[in-house]
Amino acid sequence: MSQKRQFTLDNTDKSTLEKWYRLMTLGRQLDEKAPNYLKQALGWSYHAPYAGHDGIQLAIGQLFDRENDFLFPYYRDMLTAISAGLTAEEIILNGISKATDVASGGRHMSNHFAKPEWHIQNVSSATGNHTLHAVGTARSIKIYGGKGVSISSQGESSTSEGYVFEAINGAAKEKLPVIFVFQDNQYGISVPQRDQSGNRRAAENYKGIKNLKIMYCDGKNVFNSMNIMAAAKDYAIRNSLPVIVHANCVRILSHSNSDRHELYRDENERHCVRLSDPLTRFRIQLIHSGKFSEEELNTIDKEQKKVISAAHKKALKAPNPDPKSIFDFVTPEPYKSTKYPEGIHDGSKGEKMKLIQALNTTLKAEFRHNPDTYIWGQDMANKEKGGIFNVSKGMQKEFGKVRVFNAPIAEDYIVGTSNGMTRYDDKIRVIVEGAEFADYFWPAMEQLVDSSHDYWRSNGKFVPNVTIRLASGGYIGGGLYHSQNIEATLTTLPGLRVVYPAFADDAAGLLRTSIRSRGLTLFLEPKALYNDPLSEAVVPDDFEVPFGKCRVRREGTDLSIITYGNTLPMCLKVADQIQTETGQNIEVVDVRSLLPLDEEGILHSVKKTNRVLVVHEDQTFAGFGGEIAAMITEKAFEYLDAPVKRVGATFTPIGFNRILEKAILPDTDKIEKAAREVLEY
């Protein structure tokens, strides 16, 4: 379909008009039928009617090229999905959550339309956050010279979200071919637009952003919508610049089947929006043009009703999801090392290197290994600077600005667009500094949560291949936002991997495995150990550490100290000191991989020593050590000769003054005291 042609009723051939009408009447009949499934307890427990958005949704689907474009629809985009090619059966399968639903296999909420093999993306229920994914995909389109455009669709109220601004502002800065469609019906559920922003039209909130084109259309009008979408796509591709298409729509019915719009819209308003029905108006236009008789259109209506009836019968016979499948596609299979299956080397050859050097060396090695690897973040690359701690020093100089580049101070944007980059091609690997310090990562948590269940939610069709590096922990006199640990929160999210190396060799090995694996890994780096001689180790050039494998850093028989991160060197020192003084031999187990956790390895140590001390830098209360202690108590209780004891930080924020920091964080004195108590029990 030409993107320069101006569509009018007169110059559009009858076959095209008929196709559009068939799509529109099919969509509307499904839109009206959906609530009946809920009434019959067949499913479709969430349905957001699109009636009143017909023109713009038809246009989005018709202009979408499944070979080159990427489409990110939102929950009201039923006609968009149908216009893009989804069948009535596929729509119903999604609505009633069947195993053969192409969007998610019944795992995601109804009305979340997708077909990943056609580049129609499975998006979250967090409205508007897929704008960031669309921008990331557009970045890859530009990098790889793709011929298409990334299209993000949403309602006007979700444009109030901060991450939507980050997406649009970032796309303009990077000059990316992405179209943001605002389907504006003037309501966010029951909240009118006047309560969302000072501007009546949401797109006007984005005026003044350089490199951003804003186009307006009547989203109720088929021809105007087709022309504006065609112009937007042509402009975005030709200029490699973002476009907002602001489509004026009406919402004829309630927000969803759980909403009653008569509670906040009077009869006059509801009557007026019914008069603006785009399908009714299009039908009248077709008849008045003389190209169609009323009888012809009635025949099409009946034919589409039969299509839906046949689709309904087939969908009802489709299998339901198997409850045994809930553990499928939680986390993808990781890259597996054949040379270092246990993540251990003899350490006899080569010179020791610092932890920060191991990270830098491994990053460069992996960039040479895979040319489709990228790294970006705050302070990532400016002349001789390479990250806030210079972990990426020298990388931009060697690998160029396309592969190593800076991010704005917008953590949502960093994580969300990284997710989108890997949607373009599964071979792409992205490493990000998710925030300059782990404590600053919280603004990106919605993106992290959304990304964590991408693989599960899409029934294995998509997984973001992203390694998120975070400088973690204290002992630097940093205080709030520079010294706290966040791993206890991260490990509550299925679909993530969380690793926390403390020695240079493990840092290199886990980083290599993280980058080469499919999926999302949180790579936590104990920044106090970056240059500490205590973390130095010999690092083989090709060293790899598998996920879910702990490492015994010190063999022992009388007590197992289970630890990771900054407290690992402390525990080793305490173990040496106690053995020197008492002869008691303490085993120190480095967890290093928190998620997945090596339960077998930890329990093996517990069964050998019969006494356990769990030590970590994070708060003791609700810290990750509580999970380890509970696992040991549940699975190795009969082997214990003493209660499992924990050492961690106090349940307080971390103070800036070094005196306060020392009082809060664990140290060798606190660890030694606890270890002696367990040994003496």
Image (tube, rainbow, N blue to C red):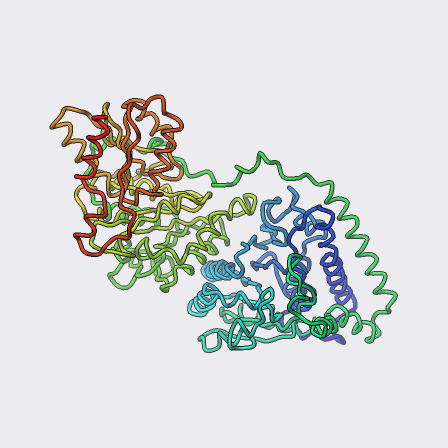
Residue at the extreme right of the image, as rendered: 295
- Determine the residue located farthest toward the left in the rendered image: 581
- From the viewer's perspective, tell me whether residue 461 is left or right of residue 55: left
Reply above or below: 591 against 406.
above
Give the side of residue 368 with respect to residue 39, left or right. Answer: left
304 or 92: nearer the eye? 92
**Total marks in image:** 0
> Where, by quadrant of the figure, is residue 305 drawn?
bottom right
Q: Residue at x 71, y 58 (%)?
A: 31
Q: Is residue 352 rendered to the left or right of residue 284?
A: left
**Quarter of the figure with the C terminus:** top left
For residue 186, above or below residue 592: below
- Residue 34, position in %: x, y? 71, 54
Name the residue at 50% across, 59% down: 129
| Residue 258 lies in quadrant | bottom right
Answer above or below: position of 593 versus 525: above
Q: Position of residue 419 (x, y in %)?
A: 46, 54
User: In the drawing, does residue 472 fall left or right of residue 170?
Assistant: left
**Quadrant the N terminus occupies:** bottom right
- In the image, 40 versus 112, the foreground residue is 40
Image position, residue 634 (x, y; %)? 40, 28
Tell me what residue is drawn at x 28 percent, y 57 percent: 387
Q: Where's residue 218, x and y in %?
A: 65, 74
Q: Residue at x 37, y 28 (%)?
A: 600
Which of 87/31 is in front? 31
